[in-house]
């Protein structure tokens, strides 16, 4: 069965009959994160809500106003996860969360374009890909990927986007000889007779179950974020497409505006000023460390010379560091004192270190407490 969402990825509303509704405790998987769920699996005659597959996450949406939090494919059925039951035999109004769907369409179609250019023009085939909540990446079967290739690929993809090349869906039977032209890593074992092939003009033809744009111009823009080592012998290329690029740009502008206010300098000079601040901070930390070591020695001499000699020492200094506490403890070794030192993290007031030292009989009792 080809679902309605696969026939028309731009269909936002649809009506279909409820075939089954069963209780379930199967967990929800969202961008790789698993969470508990108790509710119902609803099966419809057809659906515009895409079930997870082909590297694309599932849709969110509503059935008669009831929220759908996950959709999974099981053979030729799509299971819709809802927290409330729906009566079998009734017709329900489906509505897809369009913002989420269109985002997934942009990232998925962008991945097809990116993988096609990397393979055809740079001999870098894609072995897998990941569509995350904020970033995506393709995994390449090579470690010989450099910045020149990345820039050339980005430029080529954006040039094709500007050409507004059509993206079409072709339906084939599973034994159609034309399928040999489409790249695939193997069909699922429960794959049915009809196969979808996503065709980007004459650039690429690929078997895929996901939802896609109908024209490359709908991708708006693609931005490659860089490369990082992947699994053994592989490289990951991170990327953003469409609305994710503009949203990321806005976040960066907001951070730059905030940083400009803090540094009281123009953005072009931020890097130089931060480097200067880091250098000054390093010098200040070194000076502070020297002063604290002198203070530790002062505390040691003061306690050694105290009359009468104390039986225990409790010390908490807000400016103290673990090194300061250890220096005092080391200086008082062999003095038969029970010592309790505490310090807190500068930027985490509720976190810190507790250090105790003294006779074994006291440490064994009080250490556990």
Image (cartoon, rainbow, N blue to C red):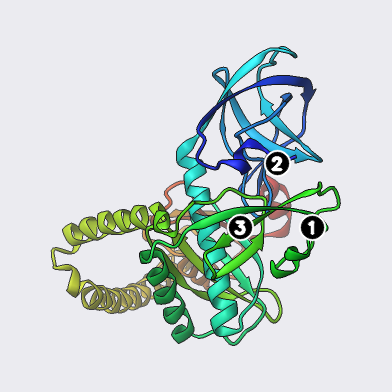
Secondary structure of the residue carrying numbered label 1 = loop
- For the residues marked 2 and 1, what is the alpha-carbon distance in whole angstroms? 15 Å
**First of labels 3, 2 by sequence position:** 2
* Residue closer to the observer: 299 or 182: 182
Secondary structure of the residue carrying numbered label 2 = loop
* Number of residues whose C-alpha sits closer than 10 Å to that of mark 1, classed few (under 14), some (14–19) or many (20 or more): few
- For the residues marked 3 and 2, what is the alpha-carbon distance in whole angstroms? 14 Å
Secondary structure of the residue carrying numbered label 3 = strand
**Quadrant of the image containing the N terminus:** top right
The residue drawn where x is 26% and y is 54% is 254
Which residue sits furthest front? 177
Residue 161, relative to residue 36: is it above or below?
Answer: below
* Residue closer to the observer: 136 or 339: 136
**Left or right: where 222 falls relative to 366:** left
The residue drawn where x is 51% and y is 42% is 101
**First of labels 2, 1 by sequence position:** 2
**First of labels 3, 1 by sequence position:** 1
Residue under label 2, please give it: 2
Residue under label 3, please give it: 198
Residue under label 1, please give it: 187
* Number of residues whose C-alpha sits closer than 10 Å to that of mark 2, classed few (under 14), some (14–19) or many (20 or more): some
Decide: marks 3, 1 in contact (CB < 8 A)?
no
**Rendering coords of residue 198 (x, y %):** 61, 57
**Left or right: where 345 falls relative to 326:** left
């Amino acid at each position: 069965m080809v679902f309605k969402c696969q026939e028309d990825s731009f269909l936002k509303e649809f009506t279909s009959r409820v075939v089954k509704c069963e209780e379930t405790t199967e967990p929800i998987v969202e961008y790789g994160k698993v969470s508990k769920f108790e509710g119902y699996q609803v099966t419809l005659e057809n659906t515009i809500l895409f079930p997870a597959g082909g590297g694309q996450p599932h849709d969110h949406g509503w059935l008669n106003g009831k929220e759908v939090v996950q959709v999974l494919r099981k053979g030729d059925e799509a299971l819709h996860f809802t927290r409330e039951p729906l009566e079998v035999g009734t017709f329900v109004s489906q509505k897809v969360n369009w913002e989420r769907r269109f985002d997934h369409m942009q990232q998925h179609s962008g991945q097809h374009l990116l993988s096609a250019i990397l393979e055809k023009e740079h001999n870098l085939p894609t072995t897998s890909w990941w569509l995350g909540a904020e970033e995506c990446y393709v995994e390449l079967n090579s470690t010989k990927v450099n910045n020149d290739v990345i820039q050339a690929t980005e430029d080529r993809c954006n040039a094709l986007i500007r050409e507004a090349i059509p993206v079409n869906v072709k339906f084939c039977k599973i034994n159609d000889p034309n399928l040999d032209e489409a790249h695939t890593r193997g069909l699922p074992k429960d794959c049915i007779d009809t196969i979808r092939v996503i065709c980007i003009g004459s650039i690429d033809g690929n078997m895929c179950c996901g939802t896609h744009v109908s024209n490359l111009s709908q991708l708006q823009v693609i931005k490659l974020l860089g490369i990082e080592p992947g699994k053994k012998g592989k490289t990951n290329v991170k990327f953003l497409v469409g609305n994710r690029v503009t949203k990321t740009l806005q976040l960066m502008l907001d951070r730059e505006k905030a940083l400009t206010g803090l540094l009281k300098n123009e953005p072009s000079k931020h890097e130089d000023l931060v480097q200067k601040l880091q250098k000054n901070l390093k010098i200040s930390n070194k000076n502070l460390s020297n002063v604290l070591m002198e203070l530790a020695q002062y505390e040691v001499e003061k306690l050694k010379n105290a009359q009468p000699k104390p039986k225990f020492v409790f010390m908490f200094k807000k400016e103290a560091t673990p090194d300061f506490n250890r220096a005092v403890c080391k200086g008082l070794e062999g003095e038969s004192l029970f010592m309790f030192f505490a310090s807190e993290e500068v930027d985490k007031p509720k976190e810190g270190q507790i250090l105790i030292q003294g006779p074994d009989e006291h440490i064994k009792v009080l250490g556990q407490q």
